[in-house]
Amino acid sequence: MTSVAQAGERIEELLASLRSRGGAAADTAEELVRLLVGMYGDGLAAIMAALAEEGDQGRAIMDRLTADPLVEGLLLLHGLHPLDVDARIQRALDQVRPYLGSHAGGVQYLGVTDGVARLRLEGSCHGCPSSTVTVRLAIEGAVQDAAPEVTEVVVEGVTAPPEPKLLQIGPRPDGMPGAGALASTGSAAGGEWVTLPDIGPPSSRPVTATAAGLAVLVCSVRGTLYAYRDQCASCGSSLGGGTLDREVLSCTCGSRYDVCRAGAGLDGLAAHLDPLPLLTDSQGVRVAVPAAVPS
């Protein structure tokens, strides 16, 4: 399903292509887009106004509508979302906190001033450069999706490292140095969130996809998604043909991993999978990958 942001970007690309050719076609297309957007915007406004008049029952329907990423995106586009910017950001932070893990500490929302959303990172991660990339991407992505009117997101307590690393959000496997910290996927000059293609509903089988040239494995455990580089730490083959029994992922070579504990090897296996931060938001299922994918 195409998100509102993706559709908007594609429309802009098409309009830019028409403008580059000159003539009246670009002006006609822009007017057409304005008329269509205005028409369905007025329709959405009428629907939201009617629901607001229905009291608790109407608010319940609004909640169901805003839970749909596509509908929520349209409401945000037209300034019709029933929640104000503060409530939307608070809700987005509540949704992203579980992905920050215990190492990330707490995130305090300080408010929006002149289009700038300010937050403070508290707890054991305050000023810790090792988690800069993951924390910054997770918080900024969540806030920008929930409040597109925000022009900048400032997170106090995040110190930029000289060579940032892309980190997994979650506890490190037992027996690895610094248990309870985040597992690194390796050095990277930076990172970006990449939306995965449609991977379908959560299932009991691992799903493979590609993000910015990186082979990714996605596992669903009790409704929670976990992402890893699609490579067995023992044999190096894809894990797409493996089996998933609750949190235990088994490769065809016989190696087993705990996908809920940063891909820790089981049965005495010292090796572990390479985890990737993952978010589910209005843009779909996204993973953070290094700017340069290691070969």
Image (cartoon, rainbow, N blue to C red):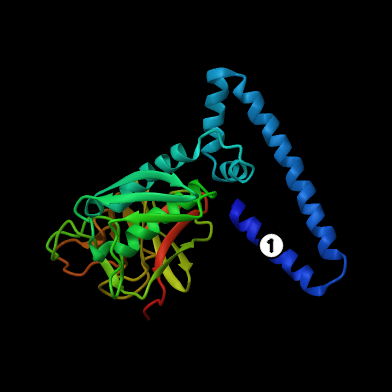
Q: Residue at x 26, y 59 (%)?
A: 262
Q: Residue at x 16, y 62 (%)?
A: 267
Q: Residue at x 39, y 64 (%)?
A: 241
Closest to the observer, 24 or 276? 24
Q: Is residue 255 visible?
A: no
Query: Dot 1 corresponds to which residue?
Result: 12
Which percent across, then down, holds residue 33? 77, 53
Q: Taking 165 as reference, is 178 left or right?
A: left
Q: Residue at x 53, y 60 (%)?
A: 197
Q: Taking 138 as reference, is 71 left or right?
A: right
Q: Give neighbour class at mark 1: few <14, some 14-19, many 20+ (Cα, 10 Å).
A: few
Q: Secondary structure at mark 1?
A: helix
Q: Is residue 51 above or below residue 136?
A: above
Which percent across, then down, holds residue 232? 30, 70
The quadrant the C terminus occupies is bottom left
Tell me which amino acid carries mark 1: Glu
Which percent across, then down, holds residue 177? 13, 66
Which percent across, then down, holds residue 71? 60, 41
Task: Name, please, the residue furthest toward the right.
Answer: 24
